[in-house]
Image (tube, rainbow, N blue to C red):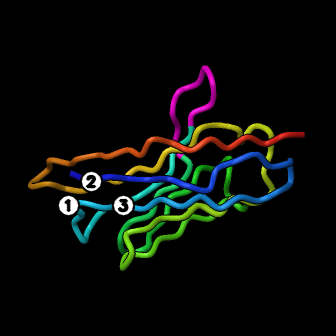
């Protein structure tokens, strides 16, 4: 099993910055993809950004140029630096880890989420 614990959410004014952190523990394989997803009230959970264990990133168009994802493989941590925050970034942000168990069988794990609220 894998456990993910997010931190760093909170209330910030529009234009401000936050840094989210996610600590992973448990049975983590060296090759995996970690990422951040967000879910606003009444909406589906959607991709914010992902990063593979070799550093390849995928970032949603809505946050490109404002958010940066990074990771520390030695510490099993993933980060999301959020700059120039907008009211529409308000959501619960979830950390995710996906790894291949065997063959084509993947396992996905989720954190409990951290609330980000951007005020005008």
Magenta-colored stretch includes residue 43: yes
Between 61 and 54, the one lying in front of the other is: 54
Q: Position of residue 112 (x, y in %)?
A: 45, 41
Left or right: 85 as drawn, with respect to 53: right
| Position of residue 104 in the picture relative to residue 79 (left or right) | left
Identify whether 3 is placed above or below 55: above
Q: Are marks 2 and 3 in contact (CB under 8 Å)?
A: yes
Answer above or below: position of 38 versus 44. below
Q: Position of residue 45 (x, y in %)?
A: 51, 33
The answer to whether the residues at label 1 and label 2 have Cβ atoms under 8 Å apart is yes
User: Residue 24: which disc?
Assistant: 3
Question: Mark 1 or 2 closer to N-term?
Answer: 2
Which residue in the structure is indicated by mark 1?
Answer: 27
Q: Residues within 10 Å of mark 3 (few under 14, many from 20)?
A: many
Report how many numbered discs are placed on residues in the image.
3
Instruction: Specify the segment rendered in magenta.
Output: 39-47
Q: Residue at x 84, y 40 (%)?
A: 119
- Determine which quarter of the picture holds residue 19: bottom right
In terms of secondary structure, what is the magenta stretch mainly? loop
Outermost residue toward the bottom in this view? 74
Image x and y of residue 106, in percent: 20, 48
Instruction: State how far apart marks 1 and 3 are (Cα).
Output: 9 Å
């Amino acid at each position: 099993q894998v456990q993910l614990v997010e931190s760093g959410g909170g209330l910030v004014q529009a234009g401000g910055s936050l840094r989210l952190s996610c600590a992973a523990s448990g049975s983590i394989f060296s090759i995996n993809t970690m990422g951040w997803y967000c879910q606003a009230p009444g909406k589906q959970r959607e991709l914010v950004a992902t990063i593979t264990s070799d550093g390849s990133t995928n970032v949603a168009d809505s946050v490109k140029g404002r958010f940066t994802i990074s990771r520390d493989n030695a510490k099993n941590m993933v980060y999301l630096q959020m700059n120039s925050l907008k009211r529409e970034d308000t959501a619960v942000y979830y950390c995710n880890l996906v790894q291949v168990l065997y063959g084509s069988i993947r396992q996905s794990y989720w954190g409990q989420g951290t609330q980000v609220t951007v005020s005008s």
